Each structure stands twice: as structure tokens, then as C-alpha cells.
Image (cartoon, rainbow, N blue to C red):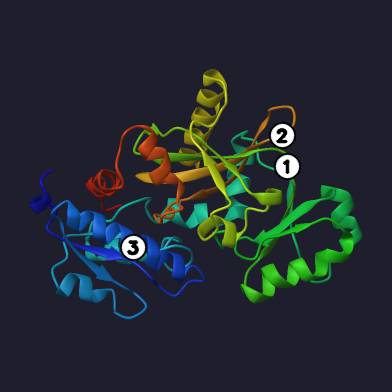
Amino acid sequence: MTPSDFGKVAVLLGGKSAEREVSLMSGTGVLKALRAKGVDAQAFDPAERELAELRREGFARCFIALHGRGGEDGTVQGALEVMGIPYTGSGVLGSAVALDKWRSKMIWLAGGLPTPRYRILGARDDWDAVARELGLPLIVKPANEGSTLGLTKVSAVSQLPAAYELAAKEYHDTALAESFVEGPEYTAGILGDTVLPLIRIEVPEGNYDYQHKYFSDDTQYLCPCGLPAKKEDELKALSLEAFRLIGCSGWGRVDLMLDAAGGPWLLEINTSPGMTGHSLVPIAARAVGMSYEDLCLKILEGAHVG
């Protein structure tokens, strides 16, 4: 496709979620890249404008650079489908399920795929029983947020009430606890039917939180990831299977870890991954010779309705 074939393109950025700041960074990068390729791309913030303006103003397709609820959970995707405007990334179902870590886990387990043991937490839970069931340390996080927002690594039972409060109250969400996997973290970028080279994530003291993910220069992203080719191929195949089982399509990212025995454990799927200077899919794309600008154009080419 030539740049003019795309028509007027809206880059959806910002939004009202807890990830607004990162979405603005991602969207600004995408906007600049598409314009550099000659695409008539314009910024569109759903927090400041009604989505109906997209159709009234003649936008031909949308690049979704929104993160979190309201942009990555199927709601924007559904609105765009009603208006008949093609958009990037997964459809309504895949987007909604992928952002819901609880239901993603249920689907993976039903499909025989490995994911850490978990339970949904409640304010009246017996915290000692939770620790006995899942072991310590464990992870507590919101079930419907991304970017490690509200995530706590719990090393003692006494830390569980505060971790629950952060995940369930501050983020107005269902809180999920899962067994902690001791080992390296990897991520698999997916572009169409292709799994990009895996990235190994190394952070100070193993704390891959919001700050380290987007703003720290101490975090290291290793690509090549250092795994034997056969092992990397196995993890790429698992990631693509997990992505498809949830109903995802277009592009996205699958996060997973390896335990001490080399066994893989699926963590979550991002259907609208970050596109900032610290983001992972652009790093993996560069490893196969694809520039940031070409990556944005490739994602845009995959825009669809339904």
C-alpha cells in the first residue's frame, strides 16, 4: 500500500485509563513515524473528543495507541466496529479477554497451557491460607490493569492486606494473587502470524515495575535473548498459541517466564503494547531489520473491522 491508500488516519492516544501518560508517549511516537512515511495521520484523544467525531471528520482507519481500560479492553474496538472504521490490533473479544488476567488464565488452563497458580482475593480472606496455598513470595496485582500498575511482590503474610488494598481499592479492580516464578522474564512480540525474536528483561533486583518499564535506564533488554535456538523456537510457538487461544490477532505481546528447571509460565498478553523509547515490540522489530517507522506502517496495514 502507498501512504495515500490509508486515507486520513486517527492515532488514538491518551484516554482516561491509569496508563494515559504512557499512551500519550506511545501515540506521539506513532504519529511522528506515520507522518514520516507520508501518511495523513492526526492525533485523536478520546478523553477530549467524542468517538463519533471520527466518522463525522472522515477518518478512514485508526491506529490504536491507547493502553489499559477504555482503550485496550474491547470498548473502543466495539465503537469503531459500529462505525465501520478499520482499527489496528485485536478485535472486541480478544481485547476484552486479554486485559482480564483472570479469564485469560482460565482459558489457558482449559487449553492445557502453563500459567502460574492463582486465586482471586477478597477483603475477608484468610491471608495465612492464601500464603499456604500459593507459597511465598507471591504476586498480587489488579486483574484488569496493565503496565504492572498496582503490582506488589509479597514476601511476608503481613504484606498481603496492603497489597490487596492497592490492587483492589486504588485501581477499583478485582485483585489476583499468583505464585511467584523465580527465573528470567521474556517477552514475545507478535506481528501478524510472525513471532519476533524474544527479548530477555533484566532489571535491578528483579523489580520490573512501572518506573523500570517506562522511565528507567537501568533496565536491560537483551535481544538476542541468549536462549538456544530450539528453546527460543519452543517459547515462540507457545506464545503464538497462547495469543490465538485468547482470540487475539493483528499484533501484540506475550509475557512469560522460565523457572529454574527451564519450564515456561505464561503471564499475560498485551493487545496494544507500548510504543515508547523503552518499549519491547520496537526493540524486537529492530532485531530483524525493521525500523520503528516501518513497524508502525506494518501494524497500520493490518487494520480491520471485526
Mark 2 or mark 1, which has the lower sequence index? 1
* Secondary structure category for the residue under label 3: helix
Q: Which residue is mark 2?
A: 259
Amino acid type at image mark 3: Gly
Which residue is farthest bottom? Answer: 48
Quick check: marks 2 and 1 in contact, CB under 8 Å?
A: yes
239, 246: nearer the viewer:
239
Visible residue check, residue 247: no
- Disc ID at residue 181: 1
Question: Which residue lies at the image location 32% right of the left edge and 64% below the top edge?
Answer: 28
Q: Position of residue 232 (x, y in %)?
A: 53, 26
Left or right, residue 46 beside residue 150:
left
Q: Position of residue 205 (x, y in %)?
A: 71, 50
Determine the image quadrant of residue 238. top right
Q: Which residue is mark 3?
A: 27
Q: Position of residue 78 (x, y in %)?
A: 35, 63
Quick check: marks 3 and 1 in contact, CB under 8 Å?
A: no
